[in-house]
Structures are given as C-alpha cells and as structure tokens.
C-alpha cells in the first residue's frame, strides 16, 4: 500500500511537471519544472521541512553589490520559438518608387535622359502599412559588387518608355522607348557590353513579366540589340540571386506617418517622413561606440507597449500540492504603458555583414509592479522563477524577400527570487517612469553595445510586511523582454534579447530578538526587543544577450556569431533600512537560548499550528519632493 501511494505521488508530480513545461507557465530561468523546484524546497506532499537556522548565510538567493543584488537575464534559448514565430509573421514589404516619396522639386524630370545612365550606387525603397497611421519604409542603398559592373534600376527610366516585357525562357528583355533621343542615350550608356564580351551590368527589374512574385529581381545584362525602326532594344539577360548582387549595401528602417486625411485613401506622394532624435546623450554614445561618427538622427518605427493582464491578480508561483498553499506569489495589477522607438541599421561589404545595430529609445514608458508573497513553512532552498504575464506579442516585423527579414517579439515578464525561512506575508510594489532621454544600442555582431540617459528615471516604491516569523529574501523584477531575429540574404541569421527590468526590487527581512532593543533609535518604541528589520533596494537593469540560432531554427547561423550576455546599464537606487518593533510570542525578553542568539522559535510543522495573531506593522519607502527616499513606518493595524 505504501509503495502504491509513493508510485501515485511520483506519477502525479511527473504529469504535473510535464503539463507545466509545455504550457505558457514553463520556466524561463531554469529547465526544472515548478513541481521539481517545490519538492526540492520541502513543499511536496509528505515532506518535512527543516527548522529555521539563524546562523544560515544571508544572500543565499541574491548576489551583487553589498547586500543588494543583480538578477539574471531571460535566457535567449527560451525565446527561440517566439523569435521564429515573429520571423514567420513578418510583414512583406513591397517595392516603393523613390520618385513618389520625394518632393517634386527634388525629383528628376520625367524626360531627364540621365535616368538611363549606369550607376555605381542605387537606392531601393520598400514599404508596407504596419499599423494605423504608420507605414514602414526600408531604405536600402545598394553598391555595385565591383566598379567594372555597374547597376541600373528599371523603375528609374519607365517615364522614358512605352513598354517593357521579359521573356524568361528565352532570357530576353524587350524595352520600347518614346523617343529617338532616348535610344541614343541607351547606346551611349549601355553599349559597353557589346564592345567587350567580358563586360556586363546589373539591371534591377520591377516589372510583372520580369518579377512574377511582385518583388524586385536582379538580372545580368550581357548584350544589347537595337531595333531603330521600332525604338526598341532587346537585352540578353541572365537570372541572378540577391546573394551575389547585394554583396555591398546599407539598409535602415524608417517610417512614414499618414496624415489624417489620407488614412483611407493614402497615396505615397502625400506621406511625410519621420525620425526620432537620440539627443546629445544618444549621439555621444553612438560616437563613443564608433558606430556612426557623423550621425545626428536615427530613422525609426514606433512600437506601442500598452500591456496589462486581464486578471487583476496574476498568479506567478504557487504550491500545487496543498489546498492551503504553503507558497503563493501573485502579481497585483502589473502593467506597462507607452512604447519604444526602434531603429535598425545593417551594412554589408564584400558579401559579409559588417554592421547590424538595433537602436531603441523609450517613449513615455511607465510600469507598475506589486507582488504579494505568502509562505507558511520554511523553504529548504532558494527558488527563482520568471514568467510572462501576457502571451508573446509578435510586433510588426518586416521582410524584403530573399534580402532581409526582421522579426521582433515582445513578452512582459515578471519574476521572483525568493528564500523564506519561516512564515511570511509581505507585499512589495513599485511604479517606474523611464525618461525619454534613455537610449539603447544593441550590436548584434558583438562588442558595440551600450545604454545611456536612464539616470533620471523616477520610482515610487512601497513595502508592506503583514506577517513574518523568521528571515526572508526576495528579489522581484518586472519589464518587457524584446526578442529580435534577423535573417540576411538567406544565409546569415542573428538573434538577441534585450531585457529591461524596470525595476529590480530587492527586499530582505529579518525577524528576531536583540536584548538592547530591536530599534534603539526609534522615537515610538526603543525598548521592545523583538520585531522585524527590512532592507530595501531598487535597481534598474538592462540586459543584452546575443547568440546564434539553434540548429533547428528557421534562421541559419553564421559560424562567427558571437555569444554575449551582459548588463548594458544598471542604475543603483539608494538602499534603505527600516525597523519595526512589536512583541512576538516565544521571543520575549529573557527567552530561550535560541532567542538570545537572535533565533526565532522553530516554525510549526503545519500552518494550522502557527502562533496566535499579532499586531501587523507596515513600512513604506517613497520618493520625496526632491527625489530622496522617505521611509515611513505605520502603526499596528487592529
């Protein structure tokens, strides 16, 4: 019978662990399931917990500066599925004519014969409607693979032609012109391929007969035949891959905001270009990193992050084994509002990716976090857990088929690292406002990453201790994790995660006895020898992790892809300590040897045996009018 009970328990734990691991609540920070962690902590059925040991080392969970801490980032491997999904859902951008976006006084005249000249550099623009009032535009400057073989874009000289028709099986392109003068210009510019059989140039076609999929396509032009009577030329062409033609290019992502009167019937000629200015701090950082010394603005798109859970109380972590939970952690009214401006630059030289930079700047970004901790027995080991309080949100990414794909994915994470040695009922909360001056640079190729401008972030922090009988350590973090996937020329793949912890709130509490008085400096109660002491710290962290995709990823991985995991930015808020004196049964003056050494009595083996109800104290840590932290200790509640 005993063996059967044990087997049933193991089967239940195994099935529950499998269910958790395959659900959105699966652990992101550790591969083990919640059930496995809870069993290790002595919270499983039939497990006896060890008594509290006051000599146990503090900071068992959290590590960092002094008694404060640094958390751990969201692991990149856990985001691979979301990255692949975002890449698959990326919006396909369509070719946009540059003439339609330029003001009339800047565009070339329609009858300008210089449109037929071969070029060492051309500009290709792609666009698509991402969200209301915003159109994504990718601007790609393509340089000729070598100076001997120049480029020309078919769409540039369509104002001089009457028709263009590709016959792909015969490898021919027939173009008819409007005038004899245009034919003469063609002869001057293109005849080089007839003079030297080794000569050729690249033609970027944008014509339904040449581009069945509606995307621009490159061809090699090897010969030109003239038909003067019909004002036509017949080009001998060879199909080319972008991988061979686009060996040298610069690409950036920008947006066009649609004026209100054009929302329903938008024409590209009425679009207005927008960008964000990174400000002096951002420019200084970019220059310092050596990315673009002459930069004065970054083209960008706006991504809204107005996120909140439909549930007012979102369960983060819970003991699955008992009806009366031994451990329960809830997020109360956790939400984020505002958005970010995202910029992107990619540069290739000689067929190799030399630069792949993602810029991000907050735009009225705010967050609120309040986490409630409850435990009824001591924990044998520390426990840490991170989960997304919302489903993954695939932000509007974009794709230029066979050239470039950018897939961002967002999740709103809340995480807790806890270690409770006794009964604890506490709430930690914070509201944070991120300054618009903040600027993040994520170099997806390696070392040129950094952040600046977050020093003036504003926080309003609160801690309430409702009940405690021993030691507690808790670190709570909340904020968006932006996962990025990039694929270039179908052969290079990159991925990264930027985790913003806004904030990382640390609370450490100790309940015990000091014979000289627990709070000797207290004006209200300096003689009571028992009570609680709490240490608070509130940090702001930005983590960056970069690495190659997994072997089974949709994105191929270059062999030289670096792996980086580090903090880009950390603002250390001033730590505060406050003391709350109140009588605790079993820890009064002249108590046992345990109490004289600062140990509370051994915790009960079951919550129902807990000590009688005691007065409840709470403490608050808030920002003062000049930015200073103010600690307030409230009177006991009745």
Image (cartoon, rainbow, N blue to C red):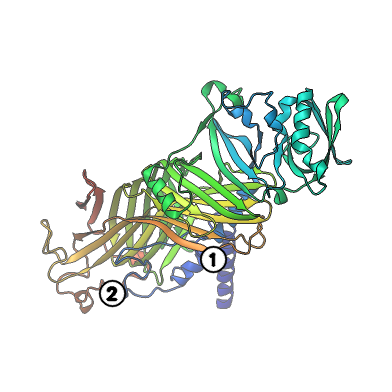
> Eyeballing the image, is 224 above or below 12?
above
Left or right: residue 366 versus residue 186 is left
Residue 275 rendering spot, x and y as whole percentages: 48, 36
Q: Nearer the viewer, residue 387 or 531?
A: 387
Q: Nearer the viewer, residue 352 or 343?
A: 352
Q: Measuring 59% from the left and 43% from the top, which residue is drawn there?
A: 397
Which SS class for mark 2?
Answer: loop
**In the picture, residue 466 is in which quadrant?**
bottom left
Residue 426 rendering spot, x and y as whole percentages: 32, 56
> To which residue does mark 2 refer?
54
Looking at the rendering, in which quadrant would you find the N terminus? bottom right
> To which residue does mark 1 refer?
31
> Eyeballing the image, is 128 above or below 630?
above
**In the picture, residue 106 is in which quadrant?**
top right
> Eyeballing the image, is 11 above or below 131?
below
| Any part of residue 213 in sight | yes
Residue furthest out toward the top: 261
Q: Nearer the viewer, residue 293 or 168?
A: 293
Q: Measuring 35% from the left and 66% from the top, which residue is drawn there?
A: 64
Residue 602 rendering spot, x and y as whole percentages: 30, 73
Which SS class for mark 1?
Answer: loop
């Amino acid at each position: 019978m005993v063996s059967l009970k044990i087997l049933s328990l193991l089967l239940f734990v195994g099935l529950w662990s499998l269910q958790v691991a395959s659900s959105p609540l699966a652990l992101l920070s550790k591969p083990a399931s919640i059930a496995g962690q809870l069993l290790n902590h002595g919270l499983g059925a039939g497990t006896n917990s060890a008594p509290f040991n006051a000599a146990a080392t503090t900071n068992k969970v959290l590590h960092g500066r002094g008694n404060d801490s640094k958390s751990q980032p969201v692991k990149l491997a856990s985001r691979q599925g979301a990255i692949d999904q975002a890449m698959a859902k990326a919006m396909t951008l369509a070719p946009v004519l540059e003439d339609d976006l330029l003001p009339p006084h800047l565009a070339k005249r329609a009858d300008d014969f210089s449109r037929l000249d071969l070029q060492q550099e051309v500009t290709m623009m792609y666009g698509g409607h991402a969200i209301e009032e915003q159109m994504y535009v990718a601007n790609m400057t393509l340089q000729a693979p070598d100076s001997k073989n120049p480029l020309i874009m078919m769409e540039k000289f369509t104002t001089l032609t009457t028709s263009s028709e590709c016959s792909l099986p015969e490898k021919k392109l027939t173009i008819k012109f409007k005038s004899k003068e245009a034919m003469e210009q063609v002869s001057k510019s293109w005849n080089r391929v007839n003079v030297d059989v080794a000569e050729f140039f690249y033609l970027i076609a944008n014509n339904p007969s040449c581009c069945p999929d509606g995307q621009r396509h490159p061809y090699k032009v090897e010969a030109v035949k003239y038909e003067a009577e019909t004002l036509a030329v017949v080009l001998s062409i060879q199909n080319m891959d972008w991988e061979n033609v686009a060996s040298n290019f610069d690409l950036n992502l920008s947006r066009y905001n649609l004026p209100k009167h054009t929302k329903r019937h938008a024409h590209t000629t009425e679009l207005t270009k927008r960008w964000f200015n990174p400000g002096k701090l951002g420019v200084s950082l970019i220059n310092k990193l050596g990315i673009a010394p002459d930069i004065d603005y970054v083209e960008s798109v706006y991504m809204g992050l107005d996120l909140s859970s439909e549930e007012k109380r979102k369960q983060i972590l819970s003991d699955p084994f008992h009806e009366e939970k031994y451990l329960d952690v809830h997020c109360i009214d956790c939400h984020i509002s505002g958005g970010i401006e995202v910029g992107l630059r990619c540069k290739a030289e000689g067929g190799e990716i030399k630069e792949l930079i993602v810029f991000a700047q907050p735009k009225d970004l705010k967050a609120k976090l309040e986490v409630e901790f409850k435990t009824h027995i001591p924990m044998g080991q520390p426990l840490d857990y991170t989960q997304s309080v919302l489903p993954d949100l695939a932000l509007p990414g974009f794709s230029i088929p066979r050239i470039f794909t950018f897939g961002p994915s967002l999740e709103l994470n809340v995480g807790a690292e806890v270690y409770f040695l006794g009964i604890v009922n506490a709430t930690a909360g914070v509201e944070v406002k991120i300054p618009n001056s903040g600027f993040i640079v994520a170099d997806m190729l390696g070392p040129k990453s950094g952040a600046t401008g977050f020093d003036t972030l504003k926080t309003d922090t609160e801690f309430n201790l409702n009940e405690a009988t021993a030691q507690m350590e808790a670190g709570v973090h909340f904020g968006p994790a932006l996962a990025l996937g990039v694929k270039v020329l179908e052969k290079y793949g990159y991925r990264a995660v930027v985790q913003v912890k806004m904030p990382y709130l640390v609370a450490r509490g100790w309940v015990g006895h000091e014979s000289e008085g627990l709070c000797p400096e207290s004006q209200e109660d300096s003689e009571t020898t028992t009570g609680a002491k709490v240490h608070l710290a509130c940090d702001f962290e930005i983590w960056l992790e970069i690495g190659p995709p997994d072997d089974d990823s949709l994105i191929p991985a270059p062999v030289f892809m670096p792996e980086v995991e580090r903090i880009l930015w950390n603002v250390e808020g001033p730590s505060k300590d406050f003391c709350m004196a109140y009588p605790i049964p079993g820890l009064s003056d002249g108590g046992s040897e345990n109490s004289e050494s600062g140990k509370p009595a051994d915790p009960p083996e079951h919550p129902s045996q807990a000590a009688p109800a005691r007065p409840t104290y709470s403490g608050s840590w808030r920002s003062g009018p000049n930015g200073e932290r103010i600690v307030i200790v409230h009177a006991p509640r009745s």
